[in-house]
Image: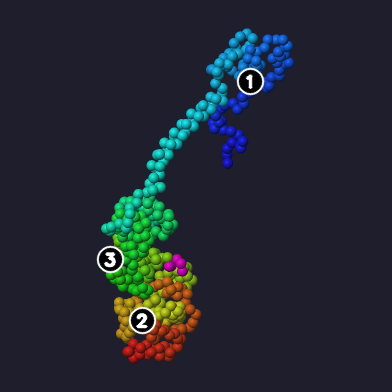
Amino acid sequence: MNGRPEGEDDPGDVIPFSTDDSEQDGPEGPAEREPNDERPRSEPGAAADPDGADEPDAAETGAPGSGPEQVGPGQVGPADAAGEAEVAGPVAPRKRAMRKAGMVSAGLIVALVALGAGGIAVLKPYLSPDDFDGPGSGAVTVRIAPGSSAQAIGSVLAEAGVVASAQSFVRVTEERAVTNRLRPGHYRLRKGMAAKAALDLLLAPSSRVVRRVTVPEGLRTSEVLARVAKLAGLPLKELQGVDKALVGLPSYAEGLEGFLFPATYEIEPGDTAVDVLAAMVERFELAARQIGLEREAARKHLTPLEAVTVASMIQAEGGVDADYPKISRVIYNRLQKGTPLEIDSTVLYAQNRRSLKITERDTKVDSPYNTYQHRGLPPGPIANPGEKALIAALNPAQGDWHWFVTTDPAHRITKFTNKESEFVRYREELNKNLGTG
């Protein structure tokens, strides 16, 4: 650190007074006394001192002539030609300094007393902040913004009349060490609550004003929108009419289908249709980054949209999670051989139907999504796949399967084969289980 070397005094911190009562030496150093400078001793028979005591020498009285000291106020100069001086009550430098120090100390004490009174007034709201008693009454909804500190939350509560002061809320959160457990959102609280009671409600999930909407894997976009409208209380027309440019779709997406990620969403008061759909698309983007969708799709010689399309078919056809990579392999084997995919769910998507029964007539519907009539992948996703289906689309299992049939839909049993004769038998098994055989 920069500063004065240890042992050196700061001139501004030192009260200037002499620390030695003896006379000071002159600028030329200590004067050497000649023998004849000494006071003459009393000779035998000389007159005795009237007081019966020797007169003190100059060094003891501080008389002039023994050093370079200057005569100052309160001091007496030479009294006679003999050079003797009388001391008429001079104020010594040490006494003057001590008197000044006493005055400074007294002033400092007064200042500290005054500061203490003012300091207590300033610190009182922090040391003993205003607080209500009890659980409060009535009802009030407050919104805690994302990233709010305990102080910011306390201010919101105080402005809403929930707590008496922001500092009372800050104090209880610090005492209980729960600041990191406070979450953004809307909360139903009461007015006139003790800060501790308000904190309890903020930590209780039941106080949160929110609607939770779960979107299962494999729903089509039309089905997702209808579900959200029902569970979140949003108008279906608003959801259907959302401008796709406002929801943050990836550049390779051609619409919402395939990009409304299945998950549970918390929809708060004030959330709009755009907010909800944007949250779903954002969740898809997160999953896509985590699995490296664009990078892995390129390794499979697919565009990201094609990879999502494969995943949507896997999701629509899949039984159990373990079947997903096998279904993925069947799709890739057929694409490689140039065989039509013949995926039943694509035909049903073309007709906007849900069914386990596919007829010959269904396989002849005129649609680019009819994979019985058109080779290769359909033009886009046919459902909104979850993460496991996306991973399976990028990581197919090893095998030479060319067909698969979900022979027992009730128990989600799917069988795979590379022999057409087995495939025919599996179809018969399915029809039997469906009661159509």
Amino acid type at image mark 3: Leu
Which of label 1 and label 2 is nearer to you? 1
Q: In the displayed structure, does residue 118 sit left or right of residue 137?
A: right
- State the image coordinates of residue 174 (x, y, percent, origin top left): 43, 54
N-term mark: 1 or 2:
1
Q: Position of residue 357 (x, y in %)?
A: 33, 84
Q: Quadrant of the C terminus?
A: bottom left
Would you name the residue on which mark 3 appears? 234
Q: Which residue is mark 1?
A: 60
> Label 3, label 2: how many angstroms apart (C-alpha)?
33 Å
Disc 1: CA contacts within 10 A as few (<14), some (14-19) or many (>=20): few
Q: Residues within 10 Å of mark 2 (few under 14, many from 20)?
A: many
Is disc 3 surrounded by few (<14), some (14 to 19) or many (20+) residues within 10 Å?
some
Does dot 2 land on a helix, a strand or a loop? helix
Q: Which mark is residue 344?
A: 2
Residue 364 image point, x, y percent: 32, 83
Q: Which residues are magenta?
A: 287-291
Measured in 3D between alpha carbons, the distance from the residue under mark 1 to the one under mark 2, in whole angstroms, is 123 Å
Q: Amino acid at mark 2?
A: Asp
